[in-house]
Image (spheres, helix red, strand yellow):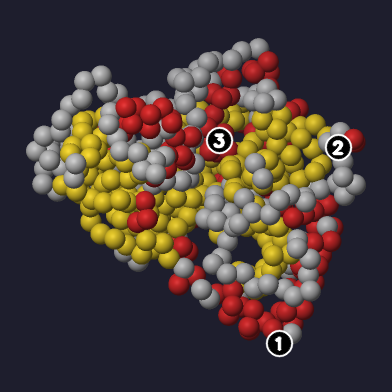
Amino acid sequence: MTMVNAADGGETGIGGDTRQYVTFYVQDEMFAVPLAEVQEIIRMPDVVGIPKSPQSLEGIANLRGTVMSVTSLRRIFRFADRPHDDATRVVVINQGVPVGFVVDRMAAVVTVDPDQIEPAESLGATVETDLLRGMIKGVDGHAMIMIIDPARLIRNEGVSRERKRSSGGAADARTSDADEAASDELQLVSFEVARQEYALGIESVQEIVQVPGSISRIPCTDRHVLGVMTLRNRLLPLVSLRSMFRLPDAELDERSKIVVVPLDERNSVGVVMDTVREVLRVRKDVVDPLPNMLGDGRGEIQSICRLNNGKRLVSILSAEHLFRHDAVRKAVAAASEMEEGTGMAEAMAASRSATVDEEEQFVVFRLGNEEYGAPIDSVNEIVRVPDELTRVPKTASFIEGVVNLRGAVLPVIDQRRRFDLPEIERNDRQRIMVFTINGVRTGFIVDSVSEVLKIARSAIGPTPSLSDEQARLIGRVANLEKSKRMILLLDVANLLDASEVSAVGEAGGTTVH
């Protein structure tokens, strides 16, 4: 075995079946991840905390224009928190979307033979072995280095860490070394179209990009072909999976994504999906071929993946058959003609235009250290917090009290408490933002209201989905790179659920017709 300093890159001198791993420390334990799965290693960035997210999440950060979740490995492995210092680093893993994991300090890059890797179940430590691929033994005085499975970390990032230890079959399912584990599993990028979940093998996904503000239409093509966009100074043809599968059309929005699939060394195609869900790592024994009676003759769907004991079914697409679809061939041919002909400049100019003019307006307010935005159309008014709120007996515990707003009773909720933030004393900067939710006017106390801000839609993207409640309340984030700000955008309609709206109404809330 050889050890290479991490700063040197460490790709030289590899032969046979050896593998390279990036190693680092969390508390006093040494861990490793496969070098091939590490996108980069960065210093601890400024992060924006997200309420109602898993306890392991440090927040979200800007990675060169991309919103990246940043998760603490200390918290995942249930070690005590400690302040970050100059040695703290974030290891960025990218399997469709970048995800950062905070480590205490980096160590080195090591080159390992397969016979030096032992199965994870033989690990005698407090770390949960279901997040490990195995362990490396006898590396320059280290008794063992635990090999983390990045895909399982990503998959479990938004899932409660309270889990039962399994035995028997689960232990048998763990493999004897990292290579065998990889051969028994599939890595998939899953996405949603018309509320159905589909997936492509990760090797078939070149990248995932936002839908541009405008798409250049291609004349004389069928409805499957949406048009073209520019991607790094080349024309990328776009096709709709909804249309290809004869599903009802739907408007593109901020959740829509383009999955770029390479056809060959020169050509790629962008497949438009309703939303991208996650990166999955699944055992091959939960994947079944598509029953013959369900085939549609073209073979785009090659198999079905059974997750959660069959409650969640994911249709796995065949990239090879997808490429043969008439829509894909026509889109690629049309893009090639445009690129070779006089329409190239016009098409590129059209696809670049309009995004700067497409804006949304938000009222920006603060809670704790973070900035939030509410669509301006959803804000009825903003008023000062009175010296005292009137308590109403037998009202729901989440209702702070009521105020008289021009003769009408307005129930008021403390938004800090709703987001599990520490309470603070009332002060002159606090305001009540009044919204109408499901027809009932409700006030929410925030720390301060700062401005009304126009934000280009090109700067707005989905918040990394970290929990169901977080995704419901804060589905989008504005990433303002120039001003180094991230603004969490609320879905006001989901601030209260149906039972809470009813409780607000019983407290005297005014119903708006």
Q: Is residue 379 above or below residue 215?
A: above
Callout 3 amino acid: Arg
Residue depth check, mark 3 versus mark 2: number of the one nearer the observer: 2
x 45%, y 72%: residue: 357
Which amino acid lies under the numbered mark 2 shown in the image of this protein? Leu
Residue type at mark 1 is Thr
Q: Secondary structure at mark 2?
A: helix
On residue 155, the disc is: 3
Q: Kindly identify which residue carries mark 2.
A: 294
Question: Element at badge 1?
Answer: loop
* Helix, strand or loop for disc 3: helix
Rendering coords of residue 183 (x, y %): 73, 35
Name the residue located 64 percent from the left edge and 45 percent from the top edge.
191
In the picture, the quarter occupied by the N terminus is: top right
Indicate which disc, 3 or 2, sits on the residue closer to the N terminus.
Answer: 3
Q: CA distance from mark 3 to mark 2?
A: 29 Å
* Horizontal arrangement in the rendering, residue 235 relative to residue 513 (left or right): right
Q: Eyeballing the image, is 292 above or below 216?
A: above
Q: Residues within 10 Å of mark 2 (few under 14, many from 20)?
A: few
Q: Residue at x 27, y 41 (%)?
A: 443
Q: Residue at x 44, y 34 (%)?
A: 469
Picture disc at residue 180:
none
* Observer able to see residue 220: yes
Who is closer to the viewer here, 279 or 445? 445
The residue lying toward the viewer, choosing from 445 and 438, is: 438
Q: Is residue 67 above or below residue 186?
A: below
User: Which of the marked residues, 1 or 2, is nearer the chain's N terminus?
Assistant: 2
The residue at which mark 1 appears reads as 342
* For discs 3 and 1, the disc positioned in front in the rendered view: 1
x, y (%) of residue 148? 53, 34
Question: Distance between the Cα atoms at labels 3 and 1?
Answer: 47 Å
